[in-house]
Image (cartoon, rainbow, N blue to C red):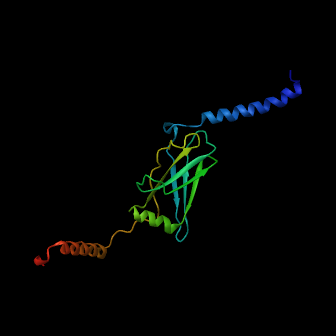
Amino acid sequence: MLSFEMQSQFYPTLLLAFSIQLDYFTWPTDAKELQKPEISVHAPEDKNVALACQINLKTPAVNTSCYLYVGDSSQPYRSTWTTNGRVCSFNVERADLQQHLQALRTGEVSCDYAVNTNPHSHSPRSDRKQVPGLSPEPKTVTENRYQDSLQNQKQIRKQPHHLL
């Protein structure tokens, strides 16, 4: 039998272990339990773009992976993780983000997250947020005419030579 002194030293350790184990089993593990995050964008001119994915978990998970998306893409543009379970931060080079936004003809980003207990179960995506100053450039009239001209040249080349 343990002496009273040994018991009093043993119980706090036991309670701590039980508390940690209880926290582990109360984290959300199913996508239905994961709330939609909110994304914020700070894009000062000539500097990197700072994006934050605000996670809305009732009980923050120890390790949470976050994913940043451009437009409708199903593949993440960037990923990161947080141990505080509340906010994931992305710091992205302005030129690189602009290149991806223009390639997908969008000016919007969104995010989602997954907790470490089930990395394959993602939250719903955040609402999309416009990135100020990095919207895709609309085609100018000159570009449209140039592309139309190229298309006409291709069609002419396809015609038999005797029709020219």
- Quarter location, residue 158: bottom left
Q: Is residue 144 left or right of residue 27?
A: left
Measuring from the top left, give residue 50's x and y in whole percent: 55, 61
The N terminus sits in image quarter: top right
**Residue placed at 69% from the left, 35% from the top?**
20
- Quarter location, residue 101: bottom left
Does residue 102 appear in the picture of this structure?
yes
Q: Which residue extends farthest left? A: 162
Q: Which residue extends farthest front? A: 161
Measuring from the top left, give residue 60's x and y in whole percent: 61, 42
**Residue placed at 42% from the left, 54% from the top?**
73
Does residue 133 appear in the picture of this structure?
no
The C terminus sits in image quarter: bottom left
**Residue placed at 48% from the left, 64% from the top?**
97
Measuring from the top left, give residue 145's x and y in whole percent: 26, 75
Measuring from the top left, give residue 153's x and y in whole percent: 22, 75
**Residue placed at 49% from the left, 39% from the top?**
31
Q: Is residue 105 left or right of residue 87?
A: left
Q: Nearer the viewer, residue 4 or 86?
A: 4
Q: Is residue 24 left or right of residue 29?
A: right
Q: Nearer the viewer, residue 145 or 39?
A: 145
Q: Which residue extends farthest top? A: 1
